[in-house]
Image: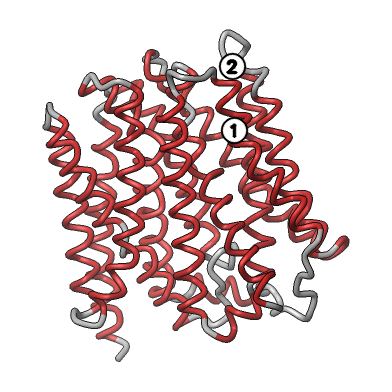
Amino acid sequence: MDARATRRALAGFFLSGVLAAFFGAILPAWGRHLDSDYSATGNYFLSASLGVVLSTEVARRILARKGLVFVMIVAPALACATLLSLTLASPPVSAWFRMAGLFFLGLATGGLNTGLCRALLPVYRRDSAATLNLAGISFGMGCVAVALLVAGTFYAYTVAAILVFIAVLPGLLSGVYARTSWYTGPVEPEPTLKETLRDFRSFGAVLLALILFFQFGNEWSIAGWLPIFLCQRIGMSPTAALLFLALYWLALLVGRGFGNFLLQRMRYRWLLISSASAALFGCVILLFTNNQFGVGTGVVLLGGGFGPVYPLIAGKIGDRYRYYRPGFFNGIFSLAFTGGLLAPWSLGLLADAWGIGVVLGLPMAGTVVVILLVILVWLEAKFHG
C-alpha cells in the first residue's frame, strides 16, 4: 500500500467523523431543541444505529464478492446521495423520511469504516499504535469540523444548503477513491464462533466488553444530546450550543492524545480511574450550572476525561485478544459496540419519563460503573497473575 493510498484512507476517517457527529449536530437545525417529544428524537438515533449495525454484515459480504475498491467508492457515494435526499426531508415533512435518511447514512458510515479499516491493514500491521492515533486524530477533526460548520451556517443558510455543503466531501472522496490503488492482499480471518464462545467463558473479556459498552454509550449520548440539553436546560441559542458541542469533540480529541502521554507516567488503572473521575465531575458541573463559563468547564472536563478511556481499553483488548482489530465488530466485543450505539436512543425514552436532565444523569451513572469495572479488571488481573 503506497503513501498516497494511506493518506487518502486517513482522509476517509475525517469523513467518518463528519458523518458520525452529523447525527447530533443536525438535530437543532431540524428544530428538535424546541420539542419535548424526546422519544421521537431518540428514534433518529435508533434509525442511524440500525444502519451502522446492519452495515457491518453488508460490508463484509460486499467485500468478499466485489472487493475493497467497490466498497470504498459506494460507501461515500451513498453518504453523498443520502445527504442530498435529506434536503427534501426537513420539517414539516414527516419524520419518517428523515429517519429513513439517517438509516441509510448509518449504513454508509458503517460501510465506510469497514472499508477504511481493511484498507489500512498493511500499515496497521507495521505500526498499530501510530495508525490508530492518526486515524483517531482525523476522525476527531471531522467531528469538530461538522459541529463548527452547522454552528457557523445555522442562521445564515437554510437546512438544505447546510446539507449540500456537507454532501460535497463524500462526493469528492468517492471520486478520489475510484482512482486509488487499494490493498488487495490477504487479510486475517474473522473470529470463529468457537473463539467468540471462548470469550464468553473469560471473565476478563466480559469485563472489558462491559467497560466498552458503558464508555461508548457515555461518549455518544453526550455527543448526540448535548446541544438539545444546553438549549432547553441553560437557555442557549442553537449556535452557542453547537459551539460547545465542537468544544466537547475537541476536548475528547485532546484527551485521546494526552492519555498516551500520561500512560508513560501513570499506572494504567490509575489513569483510567482518574479520567473517568474527571468526566464524572464534568457531568456534575453541567447538571448544576446556569452560565456559559460553567458549561465550558464541564464540557472540557467531560470530553478530556472521556478521551483516554477508549484507546486504553482498546489497547488492553488488543494485547489479550490478538484477533481483535479496532474498527471491526469482533466476537464478544461486538455486543459492546452495538449496545453503545443504542444508548442515545434509550436516552430519549428515559427523558420522556424523567426530563431532559437524564441526558447527563445516565452518563454519570455509566461513568461510575466504568470506574467500578476498571477496579474489577485490576482485581481479576491480580487474581490470575
On screen, residue 381 versus residue 204, left or right, reads: left
Q: Secondary structure at mark 2?
A: loop
User: Which residue in the structure is indicated by mark 2?
Assistant: 90
The 10 Å Cα crowd at callout 2, few under 14, some 14 to 19, many 20 or more, is: some
Q: Earlier in the sequence, mark 1 or mark 2?
A: 2
- Amino acid found under the numbered disc labelled 1: Phe
Residue 77, given in percent of the width and then of the height, sits at: 75, 44
Residue 305, given in percent of the width and then of the height, sits at: 24, 57
The 10 Å Cα crowd at callout 1, few under 14, some 14 to 19, many 20 or more, is: some
The residue at 71%/77% (across/down) is: 189
Looking at the rendered image, the quarter that the N terminus falls into is bottom right
On screen, residue 158 versus residue 304, left or right, reads: right
Residue 285, given in percent of the width and then of the height, sits at: 13, 40
Image mark for residue 93: none
Q: For the view shown, which residue lies furthest in the right direction?
A: 65
Q: Is residue 307 above or below residue 383?
A: above
Count of numbered marks: 2
User: Which residue in the structure is indicated by mark 1?
Assistant: 165
Please state which of residues 168 and 67 is positioned toward the viewer in this rendering.
168
Q: Is residue 358 above or below residue 265?
A: above
- Amino acid found under the numbered disc labelled 2: Ser
Q: Is residue 179 above or below residue 85?
A: below
Please state which of residues 122 and 377 is positioned toward the viewer in this rendering.
122
The residue at 61%/77% (across/down) is: 195
Task: Give residue 349's quadrant in the image.
Answer: top left
